[in-house]
Image (cartoon, rainbow, N blue to C red):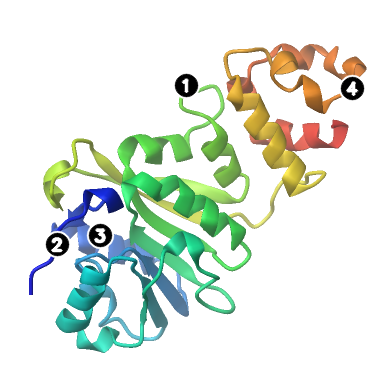
Amino acid sequence: MQYTLKKSLGQHFLKDENICKQIVEAIQQHPFKQLVEVGPGAGALTKYLLPLQGFDFKAVELDDEKVAYLYKTFPTIKDKIIHHDFLQIEAPFEGLFTVVGNFPYNISSQILFKILDWKEQVPVIIGMFQKEVALRIAAKEGSKTYGIISILIQAFYEVEYLFDVPPESFNPPPKVMSGVIRLTRKKTTYSVKSEKAFVQLVKMAFNQRRKMLRNAVKGLFQPEILEDSFFNKRAEQVSIEEFAALTFKM
């Protein structure tokens, strides 16, 4: 049974068996009872996940053709597919679950933000991204790539860049290098006035990242607070901890 690749869905299917094995190895370093695979596609990774024992498995796939292909190729997947758009679903399990996937590149950031909504339930995420996006998620303050996604993810998760994945590992080969990262939920998180205030502050600060913080976020603080020399910094010079502390002055 053949399937077609859909550009509109950002599909690049993994075909390198060694990369699949490395990802499965990385998943198994943290024990879990429930696992969700995002975008199994033609099942390169699924093939290695299905035989593993001791946990419940679900795969979320939007593409009708891929779902039909998965049913035919892996009969044991029968009741394990959620045939839906990952960005539209409710949490696929009650309780804790790990997430893994070769995330469709055109929505990989949205997938992460969706998982953030379930962060209390998701202790570990292992995802394949465009390398540039993976590095942005892992970036520290002071670097040019540090931004909204770095802060909102790192406020709750430790980020480890695991390994590069070259274009020839995929069909069709993307024009960019890819990278696999692991996110592990932090035991303690930063104290903030509210998550909503934190997100609002970070987004506003980086929407005008070239400006001094004072000008970028002036709508959120009283003028006398903004006189503090701290606000001479630019957004990329402010640590996550400092952003969290600032929310109490908003």
Q: Is residue 131 above or below residue 222?
A: below
Mark 3 and 1 residues: CB-CB less than 8 Å, in contact?
A: no
Q: Is residue 129 above or below residue 73?
A: above
Decide which of 242, 37 is in the foreground and name it. 37
Camera-side mark, 3 or 1: 1
Mark 3 and 4 residues: CB-CB less than 8 Å, in contact?
A: no
- Of the numbered discs 2 and 4, the one sitting upstream in the chain is 2
Q: What kind of residue is marked 3?
A: Gln
Q: Is residue 172 left or right of residue 152?
A: left
Q: Is residue 238 left or right of residue 29?
A: right
- Of the numbered discs 4 and 1, the one sitting upstream in the chain is 1
Decide which of 187, 55 is in the foreground and name it. 55
Q: To which residue does mark 2 refer?
A: 17
- Of the numbered discs 3 and 2, the one sitting upstream in the chain is 2
Q: CA distance from mark 4 to mark 1?
A: 29 Å
Q: Residue at x 46, y 78 (%)?
A: 34
Q: What kind of residue is marked 1?
A: Lys
The quadrant in which residue 2 appears is bottom left
- Of the numbered discs 3 and 4, the one sitting upstream in the chain is 3
Q: To which residue does mark 3 refer?
A: 22
Q: Is residue 205 left or right of residue 87?
A: right
Q: Is residue 121 above or below residue 177?
A: below
Say what secondary structure mark 4 lies in: loop
Percent x, y of residue 31: 45, 73
Percent x, y of residue 38: 37, 64
Mark 3 and 2 residues: CB-CB less than 8 Å, in contact?
A: no
Q: Is residue 58 left or right of residue 40?
A: right
- Of the numbered discs 1 and 2, the one sitting upstream in the chain is 2
Disc 3 packing (10 Å; few <14; some 14–19; many ≥20):
few
Q: To which residue does mark 4 refer?
A: 222
Q: Which mark is residue 144?
A: 1
